[in-house]
Image (spheres, helix red, strand yellow):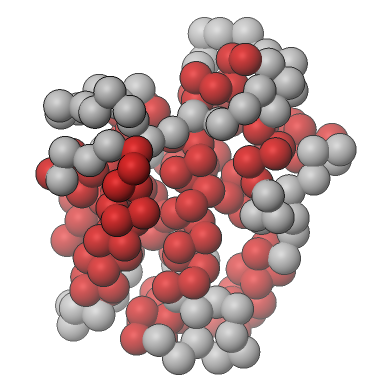
């Protein structure tokens, strides 16, 4: 069962984002609807996307060979932890830098970071985090997506503690990864919900 779930996850990792595919376009529109329920969905190329933290007017260029899974992760976050999603999207907490991290692009970076940290591209994960993650996946088929939400929330908390601005984004990503690795190997962590930082997430 665990192997099956790992295979499924790896299959998801192999799907590149393809802006010409209708289902991928629909997923982007769905993300907009979840982010801004009362606003009209903009065309697939529009200045409006920048408000969500895409770098340009066409979100599909930000995936740069990145997987469709990073869009699925953002949608999962918006659906399952809407309060935290909205809080991070709208940067409502804490003293913020003038030069903030772009929300959507940060999300893509977090997906990438997790894939590397959990050693998901190897035949058999050999990192401590990767081995522990397999156990979590055995108990919850959405373990990757839940872990993504924790990581995003953690990134924002680290960002505020460090009073960071965009130049320090990579540094904050590194410290987020380090903290996540530390929490993942704690003995009493049997599910993503057992991670100490999980308590920061609001539904």
- Residue 198: x and y, percent? 24, 54
> Quick check: 110 left or right of 3?
left
Q: Is residue 110 left or right of residue 71?
A: left
Question: In the shown orientation, is residue 89 left or right of residue 73?
Answer: left
Q: In percent of the image, x 25 and y 80: which residue is there?
A: 185
Q: Residue 187: which quarter of the image? A: bottom left
Q: How many marks?
A: 0
Image quarter of residue 19: top right
Q: Is residue 23 above or below residue 115?
A: above
Pick the residue in front: 63 or 134. 63
Residue 189: tell me if it is visible: no
Nearest the eye: 45 or 197 = 45
Task: Residue 158: give x, y in percent of width and height.
Answer: 20, 48
Q: Quadrant of the C terminus?
A: top left
Q: Position of residue 144 (x, y in %)?
A: 47, 63
Q: Quadrant of residue 201?
A: top left
Q: Residue at x 62, y 15 (%)?
A: 47
Residue lying at 24% horizontally and 28% vertically, measured from the top left: 97
Q: In the image, residue 117 lies at what x, y percent?
A: 43, 73
Q: Is residue 82 above or below residue 113?
A: above
- Residue occupying the point 28% across, 73% down: 181
Residue 192 visible to an observer of this rendering:
yes
Depth order, front residue of 56/106 = 56
């Amino acid at each position: 069962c665990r192997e099956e779930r790992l295979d499924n996850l790896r299959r998801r990792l192999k799907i590149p984002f393809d802006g010409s595919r209708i289902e991928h376009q629909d997923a982007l529109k769905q993300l907009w609807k979840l982010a801004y329920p009362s606003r009209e969905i903009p065309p697939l190329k529009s200045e409006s996307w920048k408000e969500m933290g895409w770098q340009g007017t066409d979100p599909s260029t930000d995936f740069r060979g990145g997987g469709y899974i990073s869009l699925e992760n953002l949608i999962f976050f918006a659906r399952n932890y809407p309060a935290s999603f909205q809080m991070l999207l709208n940067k409502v907490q804490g003293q913020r830098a003038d030069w903030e991290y772009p929300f959507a692009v940060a999300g893509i970076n977090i997906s990438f970071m997790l894939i590397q940290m959990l050693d998901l591209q190897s035949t058999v994960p050999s990192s401590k985090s990767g081995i522990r993650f397999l156990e979590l996946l055995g108990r919850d088929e959405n373990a990757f997506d839940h872990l993504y939400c924790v990581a995003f929330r953690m990134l924002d908390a680290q960002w505020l503690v460090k009073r960071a601005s965009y130049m320090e984004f990579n540094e904050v990503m590194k410290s987020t990864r380090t903290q996540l690795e530390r929490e993942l190997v704690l003995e009493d962590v049997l599910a993503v919900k057992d991670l100490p930082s999980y308590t920061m997430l609001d539904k």
